[in-house]
């Protein structure tokens, strides 16, 4: 399987996870979320879909680039893709906790674990393929912002 097919598989997987997360989010975004007190730096709702779409595409490209190195660095690639899978699962879980269960506190704890897994994936990806590592930087920055936002929403609504 060539590199571009591997990238496509991961992009579709990441976008699929994003789509499922969005399905969990949809009803709460229009019913529950507007009732919460939010910090002044909360972005408008329309920002989230394009940002997450771009991040999922970048994640998929990064994972595909790493996967394409499997024949050369088998153990490092396996470990990196394991961390990738864990962070992707945690990414989806966050939407369930925050929007599905309407629990910003639990989601706040979970997003810290998510951030740690993203950071570790970034480190592992960067050692295998520099571009894959660079593609994770916007994701890491966005989840850093989302962590502050999540914790602020919890604090303002406790």
Image (cartoon, helix red, strand yellow):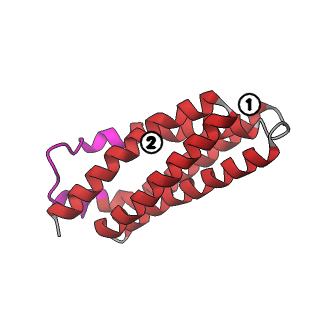
Closer to the camera, 116 or 7?
A: 116
Q: Does the magenta stretch include residue 32?
A: yes
Residue 56, position as x, y percentages in the image: 52, 41
* Residue tagged 2: 140
Query: For the point 19% across and 42% down, which residue is it?
Result: 41
Location of the C terminus (image quadrant): bottom left
Q: Where is residue 137 in the image (x, y as percent from the top left)?
A: 48, 35
120 sits left or right of 102 in the view: right
Residue at 40% across, 58% down: 111
How would you rate the neighbour count of disc 1 (Cα within 10 Å): few for under 14, some for 14-19, many for 20 or more? few
2 vs 1, front mark = 2
Q: Image quadrant for the N terminus?
A: top right
Query: Which disc number belongs to residue 83?
Result: none
Residue 63 quadrant: top right
Circle nearer the N terminus (2, 1):
1
Question: In the picture provided, is 54 more to the left or to the right than 150?
Answer: right
Q: Quadrant of residue 49?
A: top left
Q: Residue visible at 85% across and 38% down?
A: 71
The residue under the point 27% across, 45% down is 45
The reply to whether residue 99 is visible in this rendering is no
Residue under numbered circle 1: 4
User: Is 31 rendered above or below residue 46?
Assistant: below
Q: Is mark 1 on a helix, strand or loop?
A: helix
Residue toward you, 106 or 79: 79
């Amino acid at each position: 399987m060539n590199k571009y097919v591997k990238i496509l598989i991961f992009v579709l997987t990441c976008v699929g996870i994003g789509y499922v997360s969005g399905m969990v989010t949809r009803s709460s975004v229009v019913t529950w979320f507007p009732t919460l007190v939010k910090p002044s730096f909360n972005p408008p709702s329309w920002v989230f879909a394009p940002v997450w779409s771009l991040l999922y595409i970048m994640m998929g490209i990064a994972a595909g680039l790493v996967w394409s190195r499997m024949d050369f660095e088998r153990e490092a690639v396996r470990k990196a893709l394991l961390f990738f899978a864990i962070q992707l699962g945690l990414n989806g879980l966050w939407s369930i906790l925050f929007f599905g269960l309407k629990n910003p506190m639990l989601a706040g704890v979970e997003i810290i674990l998510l951030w740690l897994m993203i950071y570790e994936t970034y480190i592992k990806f960067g050692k295998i393929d520099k571009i894959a590592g660079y593609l994770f930087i916007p994701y890491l920055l966005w989840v850093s912002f989302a962590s502050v936002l999540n914790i602020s929403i919890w604090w303002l609504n406790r």
